[in-house]
Structures are given as C-alpha cells and as structure tokens.
Image: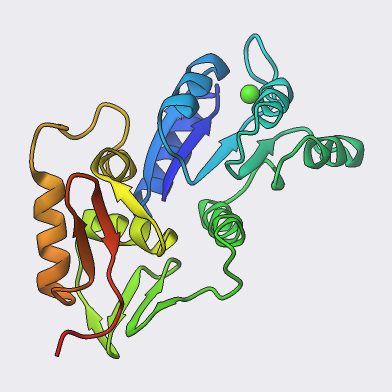
Amino acid sequence: MRLLIVEDDPLLGDALATGLRQLGNVVDWFRDGHQANSALSSAPYDAVVLDLGLPGTDGMVWLERWRSREQTVPVLILTARDGVAQRIAGLDAGADDYLVKPITIDELAARLRAMVRRSAGRAQSVWQHGELEYDPATKLVRWRGATVDLTGLEMTLLEALLKHPQRVLSKTHLQQMIYDWGGGDPSSNSLEVHVHHLRRKIDPAIVRTVRGVGYALGSGEATA
Ligand code: CA
C-alpha cells in the first residue's frame, strides 16, 4: 500500500513511517497539512493517516476540504482527542476510522488493511484472482497453491494491479504506487524489470502489456 501520514510530532511521525515501511508499505510522511494536501493532489494513495492537532490548519479542516472536493481516499484519524463527540465529528466529516493515541503499529496496520479492503469492495481478507491468492496481512502470495517468493517492490506492484483487476494502469501510476516521494527514477526501466520478474515467478500471462498505455492484470489462469 502507498500511505500518506500527516503527523507533526517528529518522534511519532518517524515511528509510524518506519514501522509501516517495515511492514512492506510505501510511506510518505509530512509534518504539515499543506504539504500533505499537495501530495494528495498529485499522487495516488491507498490511505491517509491524519493527525488532528496540526500546526496552522487543523486536521478536521483538511479532511472537510478533501471530502468537499470529492477526494475519496480512505482516511484514518489518529489523534489524542478521545472524546465521544470528537470521534463522532471525525467520522461524520468523512473519516473512515478513528483511533486514539497511543496505538501499536500492528493495530494501525490492521485497521489500514481493513479500510483499504472495504474501499476496494472486498470483504475477504485474502484476495483471490483466478489461480492467484494474495494475503495483504502476511504478504503471502500463492500461485496454483504454491508459495511465490517476491521482493517487496514486486509485491507492491502486484498489489497495485490486484486492486484494479479490470483497469489498465499507466506506467506513471504504477511507478507512483511503488516508489515514495522523490524515490525511483521515472526515466529508468525498473518498472519493466519488476513486471518481467512477476511474469517469470508467477506466470507469463499474469501481467498484460497494453501498448502505449501501461499494464493490466492478466486472467489469473495458467498459460498452458
Ligand atoms: Ca499533533
């Protein structure tokens, strides 16, 4: 998952970013809402972790702005404000979940997975596509029942394709899903290399090339 964290506390922000990266996510962390707002307008994210007590503009105001311009990204509020009225206000403003500090990384990661699963219209925790199975919690990939050993980037790429099984995804979009802010060189052919590895490790037909556009998930059935 590519995640956006908005947290002004340097220690907590660093702990969240590091912890979520260690669990295999691509993470951008911003300490103020303005930078996070720009990032959200220019890159695709699977979910946002939003602090409310931010310098300048409050997190609630950012959330209301995003929702009013029909920004549908799932948002989890992570705050010290623990009143019932505050929780209700946060959810009614468009948050998908509300957690009160302190939290553990494991619970935060599980809540994010559940949120992203719901936003992708999936009720099952293991994603199934033909003969392919993917468990976002354990990062376990199985092809025709056998475990497939993928690198972190290959996993992230596969997850991005599985999230939109019916769509052709542009190379730019996929590059944005697998590299964080400032990461990766768009002129390099590393995306092609990762696609090649997925085809070699899973099946040649697992990723379709759509010439001049990008890539799409294949049928999920084995080639011959
Ligand atoms: Ca704060």
Q: Residue at x 36, y 68 (%)?
A: 139
Image quadrant where one finds the C terminus: bottom left
| Direction from residue 145 to residue 200 in the image, left or right | left
Residue at point 29%, 59% (across, down): 216
Q: Position of residue 1 (x, y in %)?
A: 41, 51
Location of residue 218 by image quarter: bottom left
- Is any atom of residue 12 visible in this view? no
Q: Quadrant of residue 8?
A: top right
For the point 51% across and 51% down, which residue is it? 105
The x, y position of residue 150, in whole percent, is 20, 67
**Spot occupied by residue 54 in the image (x, y as percentages of width and height):** 64, 18
Left or right, 90 with reference to 171: right
In the image shown, does 71 or 154 lie closer to the viewer?
71
For residue 48, say whether it is visible.
Answer: yes
Residue 129 figure quarter: bottom left
Above or below residue 48? Residue 122 is: below
Indicate which quadrant contains ligand 1: top right
Horizontal side of 173 relative to 222 (left or right) equals right
